[in-house]
Image: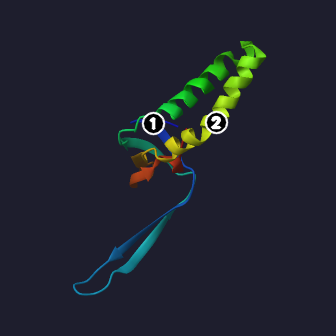
Amino acid sequence: MTLTHGRRVRLAVDLRVAGTVTAAGEPAAVAGALLIGAGAEGTVERVDAPEEARPGPEAAEYERLVSLLESFGAQMPPASRERAEERVRELEPAWHAYRNRRPVVTARVRLDGGLVLDRVREDVLTAL
């Protein structure tokens, strides 16, 4: 899912928000916790997406070959398709390494009840 300003979203998981208080010279103590249940809906007010790193040559080749196979694989000669599929399997580790280092996209979401969540990870939201 791509987060965009104004998009309606729903929490896919329960979120626990805890707060602490400190007094001068005292250790921090938990003041309370708020649990926001999965299914809470709201609207994206802001998206914070760091600039994405460009894929290396192997990850880019993986992307290209997967797209080629998805678009034209059924029309390709069997030997060509098999070579492309084998090359995709060889390049898969490079693709996964690239995907694992992607920056984390977060958002500011105003829930329908008025509560505002800031820096919510994209992977805990689903689109409506």
Comes first in the chain, label 1 or label 2: 1
The residue shown at (43%, 52%) is 120
The residue sitting at the left extreme is 24
Q: Is residue 30 above or below residue 99?
A: below
Give the number of the disc on residue 90: 2
Q: Nearer the viewer, residue 2 or 93?
A: 93
Total number of numbered discs in the rendering: 2
Pick the quarter of the image with the C terminus. Answer: top right
Q: Which amino acid type corresponds to the residue marked 1 in the rendered image?
A: Arg
Q: Crowding near pointer 1: few (<14 within 10 Å), some, many (20+)?
A: some
Task: For marks 1 and 2, give the one nearer the viewer.
Answer: 2
Spatial distance from mark 1 to mark 2, Cα to Cα?
38 Å
Q: Is residue 116 above or below residue 20?
A: above
Q: Can you give x and y, in whole percent of width and height, for residue 61 in the image?
A: 54, 28
The residue shown at (40%, 38%) is 53
Rendering quarter of residue 21: bottom left
**What residue is shown with label 1?**
7
